[in-house]
Image (cartoon, rainbow, N blue to C red):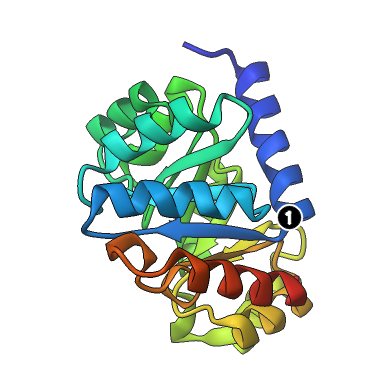
Amino acid sequence: MAGQAERDEAAEKLREALAARRMLAIVRGGDADAALRTVITLVEEGVELVEVSLVSADALGVIRRARAALGDGVRLGAGTVVTAEDAERSAEAGASYLVTPALGEGVTAGRRLGLPVLAGALTPTEVVAALEAGAAAVKLFPASLGGVPYLRALRDPFPHVPFMPVGGVDAAAAAGYLQAGAIAVGVGSPLVGDAANGGSTEELRARIRAFKDIL
């Protein structure tokens, strides 16, 4: 298992990538081949942080195939990690970080495995718990419940916490969250659309470019 120094270094590198790129793409779909094409298209268009949700069809297979196609240098994560088994199987498939919807075994197992974790939290109490659990950043989820005003309210008591809002983040909301101090935004369907279910990759490329214009 990774030592504390290695875990801290991995978390810091992920935070630096989030701060530099400002967007993490979330791939969730029912067609494994289409999801793989979506991941590869995102990377080709310069999206350097991509998460494959474990609720996707053959998600671990998609992660494994994407890792083989793209190499070790791509920041490819597993999302919707809930259990310790989720974390372990994601690591085996080649995920370089984990994203959880909430606090729990997925966070602690990820840390034990040496993978940085973007831990889901909503309330101030959960934010503190996420930090105590060693989260590299806090996934503010579902961000749509409070929107940009809620992020601003949280940043008053937590000015130095790296927040990544996720949930209902379209281009307009992304701009608002980033202006309010989010380290990055996590974007799913407003960016990916139907591409991971077999939709057009050319339309996906257009959406990626539109999002990148506001980052």
Going 20% across and 50% down the picture, which residue do you hit? 57
Q: Is residue 42 visible?
A: yes
- Depicted 86 relative to depicted 23: above or below: above
Q: Is residue 62 above or below residue 137?
A: above
Residue at mark 1 = 21
Residue drawn at point x = 72 percent, y = 45 percent: 17
Location of residue 65 with respect to 138 vertically, above or below: above
- Looking at the rendered structure, the kind of residue marked 1 is Arg
Q: State the residue at coordinates (55%, 43%).
A: 135
Percent of width and height locating residue 83: 25, 39
Q: Position of residue 118 (x, y in %)?
A: 52, 48
Residue 210 appears left or right of 101 = right
Along the line of sight, which residue is nearer the eye, 207 or 2? 207
Q: Quadrant of the C terminus?
A: bottom right
The image shows residue 125 at horizontal and vertical percentages of: 48, 62
* Vertical comparison of 67 with 146: above or below: above
Q: Is residue 32 left or right of residue 44?
A: left
Residue shown at 41% from the left, 39% from the top: 107
Q: How many labels were placed on the picture?
A: 1
Q: Look at the numbered disc 1 and give the secondary structure of its residue.
A: helix
Q: Residues within 10 Å of mark 1 (few under 14, many from 20)?
A: some
Give percent across and percent down for residue 178.
Answer: 73, 74
Q: Is residue 54 visible?
A: no
